[in-house]
Amino acid sequence: MKTHINGESLEFEPRFDETALDVIRDRAELTGTKMACGGGICGACTVLVEGTPTCSCVMPATHMEGRNIQTIEAHGRDNLHPVQRAFMANEGLQCGFCTPGFVNEGIAFYERWRAEHGKTEPSRHEVALAMGGHLCRCAAYVGIYAAIQQACAGEFDDVTEIIAPRVDALEKVTGEAKYTVDTVLEGQLEGKIVRSIHPHAIVKNIDSTDALAMDGVVAVADLMEGKSRMRYVGQPIAAVAAINMATAERAARAVKVEYEVLPAVIGMEAAMQKGAPEVYADGRGDVASAAEGFSMPYLWQNNVARLPAKLSSWRPAAARRAISATKESTPNNVVERTYGTNQQAHSALEPHAAVAHWESPTELFVQASTQAVRALRHEIAEHFDLEDEQVTVDCQYIGGGFGAKATLYNEIKSAVTLAREANAPVRIVDSRLEELSYTGFRPSTNLEISIATKDDSSPTAVRIDAHSDAGIATGSMPATMYGLSGARVLRDLNDRNVVNNTSPGCAFRGPDGPAVTWAVEQAIDEAAERHGLDPVVIRRRWYPKHEIRNRLLDWVESIPTWNEREEMGGTGRYRRGLGLSSASWAFIYNPNTEVTVSTTRDGIAVNCATQDIGNGTRTSIAKAVEDAIGVDRHDVILHIGNAKHPVGPTAGGSQVTTSVYAPTYTATEKVRDHLLSEAESKMGLSGAKAVKGGVEHSSGLTPWAEICAVAEPFSYTDKRGAEPGPLGLRLNLSGGETGIALGMHLGHAVVLTEVEVDTRLGKVVPKNVWTGIAVGKIHVPELATSQMYGGVIQGLGYALYEQKQHDLATGNVLSANLNDYRIPGIGDVPEIHVHYDEEGYDDVRGGGIGLAELATVGVSASVGNAVHHATGWRPTHTPITPHDIVTGMKGA
Ligand code: FES
């Protein structure tokens, strides 16, 4: 059979189960086209077939016969299309995994649009219709709208230079960026994990005879590490290595596992029933601790684990007494309600993936889709009994993580184990079903909240009793998180984790924040309503000492839509509502971060063992060099994404920019001083002075690049270091290889959301979101704003669409594809307005703290308050479904 890809002929004999995507990626070795959902839902695999956008993951290879296929590689860096230029200029991407698919669809739309409308700008609605078959989990949709509109209007037709705030945008829009799933080593095998089919069972025996007898199967490895008990459907048992994925999948099905099936409990409600089977009846030595928050020594009662201490409560007994007394004296001053939140799956478009290769018995290479190259190296070394230096961990590009790829996860362990067994490199890439079922999620919660206020509405006491469901894991503590918000009230905050036989949850952007904020910020609004008060005014009374948060509230009061809002609960089928929420988040950073800045003959180079997950790490580092000495950020030579470099931060907890910017800046200043003296001694530029861009002297300006070309090599390493945290302590919660410190400040945010509710169909459409954030200096405004957009859109998904669901009888996940697990698409995106307040963080090294977590924390609560304002009915559970609205309004 013959096909044509990017003008080149390809002859091949298709396998019966082969897709066009397989042919493009494996036979033609064009890895710019990505596999993400495998079901024609997300559009990441989009190519042009005779000019028509087509999902290659659902196109049989046989349909390629005689046809012309165009992949992203047709538009490389020397042949850029205006759509690619517009994506780069408008921040239409973050991690870049979805980008080739979007760009191909955009090119096809551009051609159609221009043929029919000339150089005119399509509306947002027209762009949404055209791009509606694509999903971007980073939610770079605002930039994508702008990119398509501006490209169609001809704004990039004559552009020849690269305009891009993000330094790795070019690699992403051309498909050059190589992700772990694109890695191919010589002799590499494909691995498939054999997983438990029961939620609770003992594995009695594994028989891999039939699997090993199959053609193309090389090895089967035991993954149970001496533990035979399976506690959830999907728990790894073994793994198979074969010459290709199809063979590995068949062989995995041929592995016979003998189980002793045990009684199981699925979900929080069942696990709390009297007499429910105990999930850890055999002892709690291996309790999973990958859930949100920190692992603690719990007090257990059957499946319920309680924190032994009220970590962030303040006079809890007095809080309870105050609530009881207020209830008796002035019941109107106590708001009590039970709220619930859903399990939210991370759903990164690049699934969990790893390639492992034992280069010798004591030298291990791991390519992994990871948020933490340096910490991962240490974890791998410990787990496989190696020294850190014997392990190489590399990750240049990662297609999204959001918290689920920050540790030594199962797929990495499996690839390493299998590679040793097979004596060959092994790649393991999760299917979308595995990704949505077993790789972590934000725990669901049940939150009983009581707040007591005085007659003037100022708060006196808060009680929160939280139960969290993180599957077999513990570590969730939303009530405790509220105590860190800075509210000066009596607090009785109680957290319980309810373990059950489902897969373990893990940290997700703003761990525990969205859940507790959903409850508290709606309760505050309810109190305002009781007192007949404006929502802004009650928040000023709630947080009187928060000068920064009050400045953000001043900004809310300057928004015309807020001032012109109507009374709650309008009439008619379509009703508008405005909802406010405030939020805060801790300041986390890595004090052990070291950044080395060097001169090379080719320019200024920077080394740091951190990684760019789409958050813009590369750009933050390059921007620090640009700010320090005026070298264009695109000319900085960046060495990150490998554990061999000096210690760098994990890309989690909003700690990257605040950890890397300042040491990069300082080290660059030292390099500047060296180059200045080299300019004097080697180039005879006496009396010269360093300015932005180079060295100024009597004959003009000599650029840094020219001085680098003749200067003696020089390096300077600067360390981030710790600064006083809470109570003045320089807290470094994890020393050694990684390091996490808690800073003194909190970040603050306000979110104002405008929704339209279709009261007949129960549909909620966000129309506008205004979000103000105070985290100090914003180093790279374009990328910060992109993070803000992403956080808002993920928050809207949490509020309105996303829900991981289990079959309560079998423990199987029901929402295991991107149809059944709905994440926001481009058409769901409202107008988003971002405001920065940069004052008040001058004592932080670098002048600013992180924002990516805070961007999402308050969003769902603002939606809840907006729905209440529109309808008069208060939602209590996320996601707010059409059924909830219609039935809720009937009872309101
Ligand atoms: Fe779209 Fe990350 S940029 S999925």
Image (cartoon, helix red, strand yellow):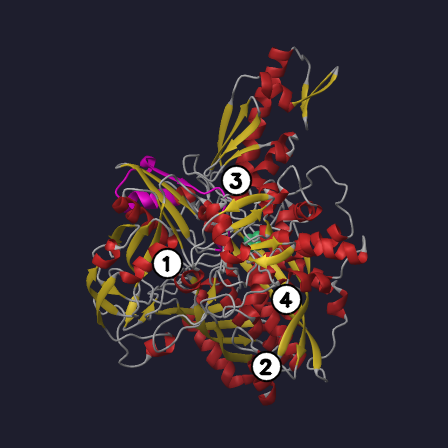
* Towards the viewer: 582 or 120: 120
The disc placed on residue 660 is: 3
SS at badge 3: helix
Name the kind of residue labelled 4 in the image.
Asp
In the image, 348: left or right of 234?
right
SS at badge 4: helix
Locate the C terminus by quadrant. bottom right
Q: Report whether the residue tagged 4 is closer than 8 Å to ligand 1.
A: no
The range drawn in magenta is: 376-402
Q: Are dots 1 and 2 in contact, CB under 8 Å?
A: no
Q: CA distance from mark 2 to mark 3?
A: 46 Å
| Residue on which the image places disc 4 | 828
In the image, 658: left or right of 501?
right
Name the kind of residue labelled 3 in the image.
Val
Q: CA distance from mark 1 to mark 3?
A: 26 Å
Q: CA distance from mark 4 to mark 2?
A: 18 Å
Q: Are dots 2 and 3 in contact, CB under 8 Å?
A: no
Q: Report whether the residue tagged 1 is closer than 8 Å to ligand 1.
A: no
Quarter of the image for residue 208 reads: bottom left
Q: Report whether the residue tagged 3 is closer than 8 Å to ligand 1.
A: no
Instruction: Choose mark 4 or mark 3, whichever is in front.
Output: 4
